Amino acid sequence: MSEDEILKRYAEQVVSEINDRTSGIDGEGGYREPAFVRYVAEILEDTGAIEESDVRYCEKPSIRPAVRVNGYGFDEARNELYLFACVFVQSEELHTVPKARLASAMQHAANVYAQVKKGLHNQVEVASEEYPMLRDIYDSLGTINRIRVFVMTDGLATVKSLDELVVGGLPITGEVWDLRRLSRCVSAGHGNEPIEIDFEVITGQPIRAVEMPDIDDIYKTYLAILPATALYEIYKEYGSRLLELNVRSFLQATGAVNKGIRDSLRNQPARFLAYNNGISVTVESLVPSRINGELAIKSLSGLQIVNGGQTTASIYRAGSVDRADLSKVFVQAKITVVNPAHLNEMVSNISRYANTQNTIQSADFSSNDPYQVELEKLSRSIWTPDQSGLWFFERARGQYQVEKSKASTPAQKRKFNELQPPARKFSKTDVAKVDMCWAQLPHIASKGNQKNFLEFVQRQKSREKEDWVPDQAYYKELVAKLVLYRSAESIIRKEKISAYRANIAAYLLARLSASGKIDLNAVWSRQTPSPALEQTIRDWTPRIYDCLVATAAGRNVTEWCKKPDCWVAIQELPLTAPTVSA
Protein backbone atom coordinates (compact mmCIF):
# COMPACT_ATOMS: atom_id res chain seq x y z
CA MET A 1 0.00 0.00 0.00
CA SER A 2 1.39 3.40 -1.01
CA GLU A 3 1.84 6.26 1.46
CA ASP A 4 -1.01 8.18 -0.19
CA GLU A 5 -3.33 5.20 0.29
CA ILE A 6 -2.23 4.84 3.93
CA LEU A 7 -2.87 8.53 4.53
CA LYS A 8 -6.26 8.42 2.85
CA ARG A 9 -7.31 5.45 4.96
CA TYR A 10 -6.06 7.13 8.12
CA ALA A 11 -7.87 10.36 7.21
CA GLU A 12 -11.09 8.35 6.90
CA GLN A 13 -10.46 6.84 10.33
CA VAL A 14 -9.92 10.30 11.83
CA VAL A 15 -13.19 11.55 10.33
CA SER A 16 -14.94 8.48 11.74
CA GLU A 17 -13.36 9.09 15.15
CA ILE A 18 -14.51 12.72 15.20
CA ASN A 19 -17.99 11.69 14.05
CA ASP A 20 -18.14 9.20 16.92
CA ARG A 21 -17.05 11.80 19.43
CA THR A 22 -19.53 14.41 18.28
CA SER A 23 -22.58 12.21 17.76
CA GLY A 24 -25.36 11.92 20.30
CA ILE A 25 -25.93 13.51 23.66
CA ASP A 26 -22.62 12.28 25.05
CA GLY A 27 -20.50 13.72 22.26
CA GLU A 28 -18.34 16.81 22.35
CA GLY A 29 -21.25 19.22 22.34
CA GLY A 30 -21.51 18.89 18.57
CA TYR A 31 -18.24 20.73 17.99
CA ARG A 32 -15.83 18.93 15.70
CA GLU A 33 -12.75 21.10 16.20
CA PRO A 34 -12.51 20.55 19.99
CA ALA A 35 -13.04 16.83 19.38
CA PHE A 36 -10.14 16.79 16.93
CA VAL A 37 -7.90 18.73 19.32
CA ARG A 38 -8.72 16.31 22.13
CA TYR A 39 -8.00 13.35 19.86
CA VAL A 40 -4.57 14.72 18.92
CA ALA A 41 -3.80 15.70 22.52
CA GLU A 42 -4.48 12.12 23.63
CA ILE A 43 -2.03 10.85 21.02
CA LEU A 44 0.57 13.36 22.22
CA GLU A 45 0.08 12.13 25.78
CA ASP A 46 0.32 8.50 24.71
CA THR A 47 3.58 9.11 22.88
CA GLY A 48 5.06 11.10 25.75
CA ALA A 49 5.33 14.30 23.71
CA ILE A 50 3.38 16.08 26.47
CA GLU A 51 2.72 15.36 30.13
CA GLU A 52 -0.93 16.43 30.30
CA SER A 53 -3.55 18.29 28.31
CA ASP A 54 -6.68 20.34 28.87
CA VAL A 55 -8.72 21.23 25.79
CA ARG A 56 -10.26 24.69 26.15
CA TYR A 57 -11.06 27.36 23.64
CA CYS A 58 -10.24 31.03 23.92
CA GLU A 59 -10.53 33.50 21.04
CA LYS A 60 -10.11 37.26 21.40
CA PRO A 61 -9.88 38.73 17.89
CA SER A 62 -10.56 42.30 18.98
CA ILE A 63 -7.60 42.68 21.33
CA ARG A 64 -4.03 43.30 20.14
CA PRO A 65 -2.20 41.05 19.81
CA ALA A 66 -5.15 38.78 18.96
CA VAL A 67 -5.56 35.44 20.73
CA ARG A 68 -6.84 32.09 19.52
CA VAL A 69 -5.85 29.01 21.49
CA ASN A 70 -7.42 25.54 21.74
CA GLY A 71 -5.95 24.20 24.96
CA TYR A 72 -2.91 23.95 27.18
CA GLY A 73 -0.85 21.85 29.55
CA PHE A 74 2.30 21.97 31.67
CA ASP A 75 5.52 20.01 32.05
CA GLU A 76 6.34 20.72 35.68
CA ALA A 77 9.75 19.03 35.56
CA ARG A 78 10.91 21.26 32.69
CA ASN A 79 8.87 24.35 33.63
CA GLU A 80 7.28 24.39 30.19
CA LEU A 81 3.88 25.58 29.07
CA TYR A 82 2.16 23.77 26.21
CA LEU A 83 -0.31 25.61 24.03
CA PHE A 84 -2.53 24.02 21.40
CA ALA A 85 -3.42 25.67 18.10
CA CYS A 86 -5.68 24.07 15.52
CA VAL A 87 -5.97 24.50 11.76
CA PHE A 88 -9.08 22.46 11.08
CA VAL A 89 -9.57 21.88 7.36
CA GLN A 90 -12.55 19.49 7.33
CA SER A 91 -11.87 18.56 3.72
CA GLU A 92 -12.97 15.24 2.25
CA GLU A 93 -9.76 15.21 0.22
CA LEU A 94 -6.18 15.31 1.51
CA HIS A 95 -5.38 19.00 1.68
CA THR A 96 -2.00 20.70 2.05
CA VAL A 97 -1.96 23.50 4.61
CA PRO A 98 0.37 26.42 3.79
CA LYS A 99 3.18 27.07 6.24
CA ALA A 100 1.99 30.67 6.63
CA ARG A 101 -1.37 29.51 7.94
CA LEU A 102 0.30 27.20 10.46
CA ALA A 103 2.65 29.99 11.56
CA SER A 104 -0.29 32.34 12.02
CA ALA A 105 -2.05 29.78 14.22
CA MET A 106 1.13 29.41 16.28
CA GLN A 107 1.41 33.18 16.73
CA HIS A 108 -2.21 33.59 17.86
CA ALA A 109 -1.80 30.80 20.42
CA ALA A 110 1.49 32.24 21.70
CA ASN A 111 -0.15 35.64 22.16
CA VAL A 112 -2.19 34.25 25.05
CA TYR A 113 0.94 34.37 27.21
CA ALA A 114 1.46 38.09 26.57
CA GLN A 115 -2.21 38.84 27.16
CA VAL A 116 -2.34 36.88 30.41
CA LYS A 117 0.61 38.92 31.65
CA LYS A 118 -1.61 41.95 31.02
CA GLY A 119 -4.41 40.44 33.11
CA LEU A 120 -6.62 38.77 30.49
CA HIS A 121 -7.89 36.29 33.09
CA ASN A 122 -9.49 39.16 35.00
CA GLN A 123 -11.54 40.12 31.93
CA VAL A 124 -13.49 36.85 31.61
CA GLU A 125 -16.16 35.21 33.75
CA VAL A 126 -14.83 32.89 36.47
CA ALA A 127 -17.39 30.26 35.46
CA SER A 128 -16.40 30.38 31.77
CA GLU A 129 -14.62 27.58 29.93
CA GLU A 130 -11.56 29.72 29.26
CA TYR A 131 -11.02 31.03 32.79
CA PRO A 132 -9.27 27.95 34.29
CA MET A 133 -6.75 27.97 31.44
CA LEU A 134 -6.03 31.68 31.69
CA ARG A 135 -5.82 31.53 35.47
CA ASP A 136 -3.49 28.50 35.41
CA ILE A 137 -1.16 30.29 32.98
CA TYR A 138 -1.23 33.44 35.11
CA ASP A 139 -0.40 31.49 38.29
CA SER A 140 2.57 29.90 36.51
CA LEU A 141 4.09 33.07 35.07
CA GLY A 142 6.98 33.03 37.52
CA THR A 143 8.02 29.46 36.76
CA ILE A 144 7.59 29.09 32.99
CA ASN A 145 10.90 29.27 31.11
CA ARG A 146 9.80 27.96 27.72
CA ILE A 147 6.59 27.64 25.69
CA ARG A 148 5.86 24.94 23.12
CA VAL A 149 3.00 25.44 20.70
CA PHE A 150 1.56 22.29 19.15
CA VAL A 151 -0.11 23.21 15.87
CA MET A 152 -2.62 20.47 15.03
CA THR A 153 -4.18 20.05 11.63
CA ASP A 154 -6.29 17.48 9.80
CA GLY A 155 -4.51 18.51 6.64
CA LEU A 156 -0.99 17.82 5.40
CA ALA A 157 1.93 20.09 6.23
CA THR A 158 5.20 20.60 4.43
CA VAL A 159 7.10 21.26 7.70
CA LYS A 160 7.38 19.57 11.09
CA SER A 161 8.45 22.69 12.98
CA LEU A 162 7.99 26.43 12.74
CA ASP A 163 10.32 29.37 13.28
CA GLU A 164 10.96 30.15 16.92
CA LEU A 165 9.22 33.19 18.39
CA VAL A 166 9.85 35.34 21.42
CA VAL A 167 6.74 36.55 23.25
CA GLY A 168 6.85 38.28 26.60
CA GLY A 169 10.57 37.56 26.79
CA LEU A 170 10.17 33.78 26.49
CA PRO A 171 11.33 31.53 23.63
CA ILE A 172 8.44 29.79 21.89
CA THR A 173 8.88 26.76 19.64
CA GLY A 174 6.27 25.44 17.23
CA GLU A 175 5.67 21.78 16.38
CA VAL A 176 3.32 20.75 13.58
CA TRP A 177 1.21 17.61 13.95
CA ASP A 178 -0.53 16.84 10.68
CA LEU A 179 -2.22 13.71 9.35
CA ARG A 180 1.07 12.26 8.11
CA ARG A 181 2.80 12.62 11.46
CA LEU A 182 -0.23 11.41 13.42
CA SER A 183 -0.60 8.42 11.13
CA ARG A 184 2.97 7.36 11.80
CA CYS A 185 2.39 7.58 15.54
CA VAL A 186 -0.69 5.38 15.64
CA SER A 187 0.35 2.88 12.95
CA ALA A 188 1.46 -0.56 14.06
CA GLY A 189 5.12 -0.56 14.97
CA HIS A 190 5.33 3.24 15.14
CA GLY A 191 4.43 4.18 18.70
CA ASN A 192 6.44 7.35 18.28
CA GLU A 193 9.06 8.88 16.07
CA PRO A 194 12.47 7.61 17.23
CA ILE A 195 14.63 10.04 19.18
CA GLU A 196 17.71 10.93 17.14
CA ILE A 197 20.79 12.23 18.97
CA ASP A 198 23.84 13.61 17.13
CA PHE A 199 26.65 14.25 19.60
CA GLU A 200 28.63 16.22 17.03
CA VAL A 201 25.78 18.75 16.96
CA ILE A 202 25.23 18.80 20.74
CA THR A 203 28.81 18.71 22.02
CA GLY A 204 30.87 19.53 18.95
CA GLN A 205 32.44 16.06 18.72
CA PRO A 206 31.64 12.35 19.12
CA ILE A 207 31.59 10.78 22.58
CA ARG A 208 34.47 8.43 23.43
CA ALA A 209 33.31 4.92 24.33
CA VAL A 210 34.46 1.41 25.24
CA GLU A 211 32.91 -1.49 23.35
CA MET A 212 31.98 -4.83 24.92
CA PRO A 213 33.26 -8.09 23.30
CA ASP A 214 30.97 -9.84 20.81
CA ILE A 215 29.31 -12.45 23.04
CA ASP A 216 25.58 -12.13 22.25
CA ASP A 217 23.74 -11.45 19.01
CA ILE A 218 20.70 -9.97 20.82
CA TYR A 219 22.48 -6.88 22.13
CA LYS A 220 25.74 -4.97 22.17
CA THR A 221 26.79 -2.58 24.94
CA TYR A 222 29.08 0.45 25.09
CA LEU A 223 30.31 2.39 28.12
CA ALA A 224 30.72 6.13 27.83
CA ILE A 225 31.07 9.25 29.95
CA LEU A 226 28.60 11.94 28.94
CA PRO A 227 28.89 15.63 29.75
CA ALA A 228 25.91 16.76 31.81
CA THR A 229 25.42 19.62 29.37
CA ALA A 230 24.58 17.04 26.68
CA LEU A 231 22.00 15.34 28.92
CA TYR A 232 20.57 18.76 29.75
CA GLU A 233 20.02 19.56 26.06
CA ILE A 234 18.59 16.12 25.33
CA TYR A 235 16.08 16.32 28.18
CA LYS A 236 15.20 19.90 27.27
CA GLU A 237 14.28 18.73 23.78
CA TYR A 238 12.54 15.42 24.52
CA GLY A 239 11.48 15.40 28.18
CA SER A 240 9.41 12.40 29.26
CA ARG A 241 9.61 10.89 25.77
CA LEU A 242 13.03 9.65 26.91
CA LEU A 243 11.31 7.61 29.61
CA GLU A 244 8.60 5.83 27.61
CA LEU A 245 10.09 2.42 28.40
CA ASN A 246 11.16 3.32 31.93
CA VAL A 247 9.37 1.80 34.91
CA ARG A 248 9.63 5.05 36.81
CA SER A 249 8.61 8.58 36.11
CA PHE A 250 10.74 11.35 37.53
CA LEU A 251 9.93 11.75 41.22
CA GLN A 252 10.16 15.40 42.20
CA ALA A 253 13.23 16.32 44.22
CA THR A 254 11.62 15.70 47.60
CA GLY A 255 13.04 12.29 48.52
CA ALA A 256 16.41 11.91 50.21
CA VAL A 257 18.10 10.46 47.13
CA ASN A 258 16.90 13.19 44.81
CA LYS A 259 17.97 15.83 47.31
CA GLY A 260 21.37 14.17 47.33
CA ILE A 261 21.57 14.39 43.55
CA ARG A 262 20.53 18.02 43.68
CA ASP A 263 22.97 18.90 46.46
CA SER A 264 25.94 17.24 44.76
CA LEU A 265 25.13 19.07 41.52
CA ARG A 266 25.04 22.36 43.39
CA ASN A 267 27.90 21.93 45.82
CA GLN A 268 30.33 19.34 44.41
CA PRO A 269 29.74 19.16 40.65
CA ALA A 270 33.23 17.80 39.90
CA ARG A 271 32.52 14.76 42.11
CA PHE A 272 29.12 13.94 40.63
CA LEU A 273 30.56 11.17 38.46
CA ALA A 274 32.01 9.47 41.55
CA TYR A 275 28.84 9.80 43.62
CA ASN A 276 26.19 8.91 41.02
CA ASN A 277 25.37 5.48 39.58
CA GLY A 278 24.91 6.88 36.09
CA ILE A 279 22.31 6.00 33.52
CA SER A 280 21.36 2.97 31.42
CA VAL A 281 19.95 3.60 27.96
CA THR A 282 18.79 1.46 25.07
CA VAL A 283 19.02 2.45 21.41
CA GLU A 284 17.84 0.95 18.15
CA SER A 285 21.03 1.80 16.30
CA LEU A 286 24.34 3.57 16.77
CA VAL A 287 26.79 5.27 14.39
CA PRO A 288 30.42 4.76 15.50
CA SER A 289 33.25 7.18 14.86
CA ARG A 290 36.91 7.67 15.77
CA ILE A 291 38.86 10.25 17.77
CA ASN A 292 42.62 9.92 17.30
CA GLY A 293 42.06 6.31 16.32
CA GLU A 294 39.99 5.48 19.40
CA LEU A 295 36.36 4.37 19.32
CA ALA A 296 33.70 7.05 19.73
CA ILE A 297 29.95 7.38 19.18
CA LYS A 298 28.76 9.93 16.64
CA SER A 299 24.99 9.47 16.94
CA LEU A 300 22.20 7.36 18.42
CA SER A 301 18.72 6.48 17.15
CA GLY A 302 15.75 5.36 19.20
CA LEU A 303 17.22 6.49 22.52
CA GLN A 304 15.36 5.49 25.70
CA ILE A 305 16.53 5.97 29.29
CA VAL A 306 15.76 2.70 31.08
CA ASN A 307 17.44 3.61 34.36
CA GLY A 308 18.54 7.07 35.38
CA GLY A 309 15.46 9.13 34.63
CA GLN A 310 15.82 10.84 37.99
CA THR A 311 19.46 11.64 37.33
CA THR A 312 18.67 13.13 33.92
CA ALA A 313 15.70 15.17 35.10
CA SER A 314 17.63 16.35 38.18
CA ILE A 315 20.45 17.58 35.94
CA TYR A 316 17.93 19.49 33.85
CA ARG A 317 16.31 20.97 36.93
CA ALA A 318 19.70 21.97 38.36
CA GLY A 319 20.56 23.79 35.16
CA SER A 320 17.19 25.39 34.43
CA VAL A 321 15.82 26.13 37.90
CA ASP A 322 18.83 26.26 40.21
CA ARG A 323 21.06 27.79 37.49
CA ALA A 324 23.84 25.39 38.49
CA ASP A 325 27.07 25.34 36.48
CA LEU A 326 27.03 21.95 34.71
CA SER A 327 30.34 22.35 32.91
CA LYS A 328 32.18 20.16 35.45
CA VAL A 329 29.48 17.51 35.71
CA PHE A 330 29.84 14.16 33.91
CA VAL A 331 27.68 11.04 33.96
CA GLN A 332 28.53 7.41 33.34
CA ALA A 333 26.35 5.89 30.62
CA LYS A 334 25.75 2.27 29.67
CA ILE A 335 24.46 2.29 26.10
CA THR A 336 22.85 -0.95 24.90
CA VAL A 337 21.99 -1.50 21.25
CA VAL A 338 19.10 -3.98 21.35
CA ASN A 339 17.71 -6.22 18.65
CA PRO A 340 14.15 -4.81 18.18
CA ALA A 341 12.62 -8.28 18.47
CA HIS A 342 13.91 -8.52 22.06
CA LEU A 343 13.42 -4.89 23.09
CA ASN A 344 10.56 -5.32 25.60
CA GLU A 345 12.21 -8.30 27.29
CA MET A 346 15.58 -6.57 27.56
CA VAL A 347 14.16 -3.30 28.83
CA SER A 348 12.07 -5.06 31.45
CA ASN A 349 15.04 -7.02 32.75
CA ILE A 350 17.44 -4.06 32.67
CA SER A 351 14.93 -2.10 34.74
CA ARG A 352 14.41 -4.97 37.16
CA TYR A 353 18.03 -5.90 37.77
CA ALA A 354 19.91 -2.62 37.42
CA ASN A 355 21.16 -0.88 40.53
CA THR A 356 18.31 1.60 40.92
CA GLN A 357 18.34 4.66 43.11
CA ASN A 358 14.82 4.33 44.50
CA THR A 359 12.88 1.18 45.34
CA ILE A 360 10.00 0.88 42.89
CA GLN A 361 7.75 -1.92 41.76
CA SER A 362 8.59 -3.40 38.38
CA ALA A 363 5.88 -2.61 35.84
CA ASP A 364 5.36 -3.13 32.14
CA PHE A 365 3.53 -0.20 30.56
CA SER A 366 3.25 -1.76 27.10
CA SER A 367 0.01 -2.80 25.45
CA ASN A 368 1.31 -6.39 25.64
CA ASP A 369 1.05 -6.43 29.42
CA PRO A 370 -0.98 -9.52 30.49
CA TYR A 371 -3.46 -7.26 32.30
CA GLN A 372 -4.30 -5.36 29.12
CA VAL A 373 -4.31 -8.47 26.95
CA GLU A 374 -6.80 -10.23 29.23
CA LEU A 375 -8.94 -7.09 29.53
CA GLU A 376 -9.17 -7.03 25.74
CA LYS A 377 -10.25 -10.69 25.65
CA LEU A 378 -12.95 -10.04 28.23
CA SER A 379 -14.27 -7.05 26.32
CA ARG A 380 -14.61 -9.14 23.16
CA SER A 381 -16.46 -11.98 24.89
CA ILE A 382 -18.69 -10.57 27.66
CA TRP A 383 -21.96 -9.24 26.30
CA THR A 384 -24.10 -6.67 28.05
CA PRO A 385 -26.86 -8.25 30.16
CA ASP A 386 -29.52 -7.56 27.52
CA GLN A 387 -27.28 -9.23 24.90
CA SER A 388 -27.41 -6.09 22.75
CA GLY A 389 -23.67 -5.69 22.37
CA LEU A 390 -20.23 -5.41 23.97
CA TRP A 391 -17.89 -2.83 25.39
CA PHE A 392 -14.68 -2.33 23.41
CA PHE A 393 -11.35 -2.06 25.24
CA GLU A 394 -8.92 -0.26 22.95
CA ARG A 395 -5.62 -1.86 23.89
CA ALA A 396 -3.72 0.15 21.27
CA ARG A 397 -4.47 3.63 19.98
CA GLY A 398 -6.71 3.57 16.90
CA GLN A 399 -7.68 -0.10 17.32
CA TYR A 400 -11.39 0.69 17.39
CA GLN A 401 -11.35 2.61 14.11
CA VAL A 402 -9.23 -0.09 12.46
CA GLU A 403 -11.76 -2.74 13.44
CA LYS A 404 -14.60 -0.51 12.35
CA SER A 405 -13.01 0.08 8.95
CA LYS A 406 -13.07 -3.67 8.28
CA ALA A 407 -16.83 -3.37 7.86
CA SER A 408 -17.01 -2.84 4.09
CA THR A 409 -20.73 -2.26 3.52
CA PRO A 410 -23.13 0.26 5.11
CA ALA A 411 -25.06 -2.63 6.68
CA GLN A 412 -21.88 -4.04 8.24
CA LYS A 413 -20.90 -0.61 9.56
CA ARG A 414 -24.34 -0.19 11.15
CA LYS A 415 -24.02 -3.64 12.68
CA PHE A 416 -20.60 -2.77 14.15
CA ASN A 417 -21.95 0.46 15.64
CA GLU A 418 -24.93 -1.34 17.11
CA LEU A 419 -22.82 -4.02 18.76
CA GLN A 420 -19.90 -1.82 19.86
CA PRO A 421 -21.01 1.83 19.78
CA PRO A 422 -18.48 4.62 20.37
CA ALA A 423 -20.00 5.34 23.77
CA ARG A 424 -18.86 1.90 24.92
CA LYS A 425 -15.24 2.29 23.81
CA PHE A 426 -12.64 2.73 26.55
CA SER A 427 -8.85 2.91 26.85
CA LYS A 428 -6.20 2.10 29.46
CA THR A 429 -6.26 5.71 30.71
CA ASP A 430 -10.04 5.48 31.15
CA VAL A 431 -9.53 2.32 33.20
CA ALA A 432 -6.90 4.02 35.35
CA LYS A 433 -9.07 7.09 35.88
CA VAL A 434 -12.18 5.30 37.14
CA ASP A 435 -10.16 2.81 39.17
CA MET A 436 -8.28 5.53 41.02
CA CYS A 437 -11.46 7.54 41.61
CA TRP A 438 -13.27 4.49 42.94
CA ALA A 439 -10.26 3.83 45.18
CA GLN A 440 -11.01 7.30 46.60
CA LEU A 441 -7.91 8.89 45.13
CA PRO A 442 -9.52 11.64 43.02
CA HIS A 443 -6.61 13.97 43.69
CA ILE A 444 -4.34 11.49 41.90
CA ALA A 445 -6.80 11.14 39.00
CA SER A 446 -6.80 14.95 38.72
CA LYS A 447 -3.09 14.98 37.91
CA GLY A 448 -3.73 14.08 34.27
CA ASN A 449 -4.00 10.87 32.28
CA GLN A 450 -0.35 9.88 32.11
CA LYS A 451 0.64 10.66 35.71
CA ASN A 452 -2.50 8.97 36.95
CA PHE A 453 -1.83 5.93 34.78
CA LEU A 454 1.68 5.52 36.21
CA GLU A 455 0.25 5.66 39.74
CA PHE A 456 -2.45 3.18 38.74
CA VAL A 457 0.10 0.69 37.38
CA GLN A 458 2.24 0.87 40.50
CA ARG A 459 -0.83 0.42 42.69
CA GLN A 460 -2.01 -2.48 40.57
CA LYS A 461 1.35 -4.24 40.76
CA SER A 462 1.66 -3.77 44.51
CA ARG A 463 -1.79 -5.08 45.40
CA GLU A 464 -2.02 -8.05 43.05
CA LYS A 465 0.11 -11.15 42.68
CA GLU A 466 2.43 -11.09 39.68
CA ASP A 467 0.34 -13.67 37.81
CA TRP A 468 -3.02 -11.96 38.50
CA VAL A 469 -5.15 -11.03 35.52
CA PRO A 470 -8.69 -9.60 35.40
CA ASP A 471 -11.62 -11.99 35.61
CA GLN A 472 -15.30 -11.60 34.71
CA ALA A 473 -16.27 -10.16 38.08
CA TYR A 474 -13.52 -7.55 37.90
CA TYR A 475 -14.49 -6.65 34.34
CA LYS A 476 -18.17 -6.14 35.13
CA GLU A 477 -17.36 -3.91 38.10
CA LEU A 478 -14.94 -1.93 35.95
CA VAL A 479 -17.61 -1.32 33.32
CA ALA A 480 -20.03 -0.24 36.06
CA LYS A 481 -17.50 2.37 37.23
CA LEU A 482 -17.16 3.59 33.63
CA VAL A 483 -20.95 3.86 33.38
CA LEU A 484 -21.09 5.97 36.55
CA TYR A 485 -18.21 8.23 35.53
CA ARG A 486 -19.59 8.87 32.05
CA SER A 487 -23.06 9.46 33.41
CA ALA A 488 -21.56 12.04 35.76
CA GLU A 489 -19.75 13.71 32.83
CA SER A 490 -22.99 13.84 30.84
CA ILE A 491 -24.97 15.34 33.72
CA ILE A 492 -22.23 17.92 34.41
CA ARG A 493 -22.42 19.03 30.77
CA LYS A 494 -26.21 19.26 30.91
CA GLU A 495 -25.96 21.36 34.04
CA LYS A 496 -23.89 23.78 31.90
CA ILE A 497 -20.92 23.82 34.27
CA SER A 498 -18.05 24.79 31.99
CA ALA A 499 -15.12 24.88 34.43
CA TYR A 500 -13.38 22.00 36.22
CA ARG A 501 -15.67 19.33 34.70
CA ALA A 502 -13.12 16.51 34.91
CA ASN A 503 -12.33 17.37 38.51
CA ILE A 504 -16.00 17.42 39.48
CA ALA A 505 -16.56 14.03 37.85
CA ALA A 506 -13.50 12.56 39.61
CA TYR A 507 -14.53 13.78 43.06
CA LEU A 508 -18.15 12.84 42.47
CA LEU A 509 -17.23 9.23 41.64
CA ALA A 510 -14.96 9.09 44.69
CA ARG A 511 -17.80 10.29 46.93
CA LEU A 512 -20.14 7.69 45.44
CA SER A 513 -17.54 5.04 46.29
CA ALA A 514 -17.06 6.44 49.80
CA SER A 515 -20.81 6.31 50.45
CA GLY A 516 -20.73 2.51 50.43
CA LYS A 517 -24.22 2.57 48.94
CA ILE A 518 -23.50 1.76 45.30
CA ASP A 519 -24.23 -1.74 44.01
CA LEU A 520 -21.86 -2.05 41.03
CA ASN A 521 -23.50 -5.30 39.95
CA ALA A 522 -26.83 -3.48 39.69
CA VAL A 523 -25.22 -0.74 37.60
CA TRP A 524 -23.70 -3.40 35.32
CA SER A 525 -27.08 -5.07 34.96
CA ARG A 526 -28.80 -1.81 33.99
CA GLN A 527 -25.85 -0.38 32.03
CA THR A 528 -27.01 2.96 33.41
CA PRO A 529 -27.54 4.51 36.84
CA SER A 530 -30.99 4.15 38.33
CA PRO A 531 -33.21 7.27 38.14
CA ALA A 532 -32.60 7.83 41.88
CA LEU A 533 -28.83 7.66 41.41
CA GLU A 534 -28.97 10.02 38.43
CA GLN A 535 -30.83 12.50 40.61
CA THR A 536 -28.19 12.11 43.32
CA ILE A 537 -25.45 12.91 40.79
CA ARG A 538 -27.46 15.90 39.57
CA ASP A 539 -27.88 17.18 43.15
CA TRP A 540 -24.22 16.67 44.04
CA THR A 541 -22.75 18.31 40.96
CA PRO A 542 -23.19 22.02 41.90
CA ARG A 543 -22.36 21.27 45.54
CA ILE A 544 -19.03 19.67 44.65
CA TYR A 545 -18.23 22.45 42.17
CA ASP A 546 -18.90 25.12 44.81
CA CYS A 547 -16.80 23.23 47.36
CA LEU A 548 -13.83 22.88 45.01
CA VAL A 549 -13.84 26.61 44.28
CA ALA A 550 -14.51 27.71 47.86
CA THR A 551 -11.90 25.48 49.52
CA ALA A 552 -9.29 26.56 46.97
CA ALA A 553 -9.61 29.90 48.79
CA GLY A 554 -8.25 31.98 45.93
CA ARG A 555 -5.65 29.43 44.94
CA ASN A 556 -5.43 27.81 41.53
CA VAL A 557 -8.41 25.43 41.56
CA THR A 558 -6.87 23.00 39.07
CA GLU A 559 -3.77 22.64 41.26
CA TRP A 560 -5.87 22.49 44.42
CA CYS A 561 -7.75 19.48 43.00
CA LYS A 562 -4.43 17.58 42.86
CA LYS A 563 -3.91 17.89 46.63
CA PRO A 564 -4.92 15.27 49.24
CA ASP A 565 -6.38 18.10 51.35
CA CYS A 566 -8.87 18.78 48.57
CA TRP A 567 -10.23 15.25 48.93
CA VAL A 568 -10.43 15.77 52.69
CA ALA A 569 -12.54 18.89 52.09
CA ILE A 570 -14.88 17.08 49.70
CA GLN A 571 -15.28 14.21 52.16
CA GLU A 572 -16.39 16.69 54.81
CA LEU A 573 -19.01 18.18 52.48
CA PRO A 574 -22.48 17.17 53.74
CA LEU A 575 -24.27 15.40 50.89
CA THR A 576 -27.47 13.38 50.84
CA ALA A 577 -26.42 9.74 50.53
CA PRO A 578 -27.69 7.74 47.54
CA THR A 579 -30.25 5.04 48.23
CA VAL A 580 -29.02 1.51 48.83
CA SER A 581 -30.73 0.30 45.67
CA ALA A 582 -28.86 2.81 43.52
Image: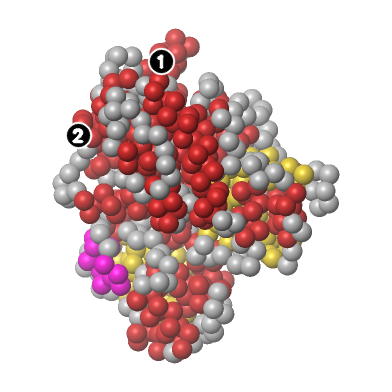
Q: How far across and down, in percent of the image, does residue 436 sit? A: 35, 46
Which picture quadrant has residue 11? top right
Q: Amino acid at mark 2?
A: Asp
Q: Nearer the viewer, residue 145 or 89?
A: 145
Q: Is residue 364 above or below residue 502?
A: below
User: What is the distance, in whole Å, between disc 2 and disc 1 at their CAs?
Assistant: 25 Å
Q: In the image, is residue 355 part of the stretch drawn in magenta? A: yes
Residue 495 spot, x, y in % from top left: 56, 30
Q: Which of the numbered marks, if any, corresponds to residue 69?
A: none
Residue placed under numbered mark 1 in the picture: 418
Indicate whether 268 appears above or below 173.
below
Q: Position of residue 94 (x, y in %)?
A: 64, 31
Can you see residue 311? yes
Q: Is residue 306 left or right of residue 561?
A: left
Closer mark to the observer between disc 2 and disc 1: 2
Mark 1 residue element: helix
- Residue neighbourhood size for the residue with mark 2, other residues' Cα within 10 Å, grouped as few (<14), some (14–19), many (≥20): few
Mark 2 and mark 1 lie on one chain; the one further toward the N terminus is 1
The residue shown at (34%, 67%) is 307
Q: Which residue is mark 2?
A: 471
Q: Write the start and end of the magenta stretch as one range.
A: 349-359
Residue 224: percent from left, percent from top: 38, 77
**Residue at 82% across, 48% down:** 63
Amino acid of disc 1 = Glu
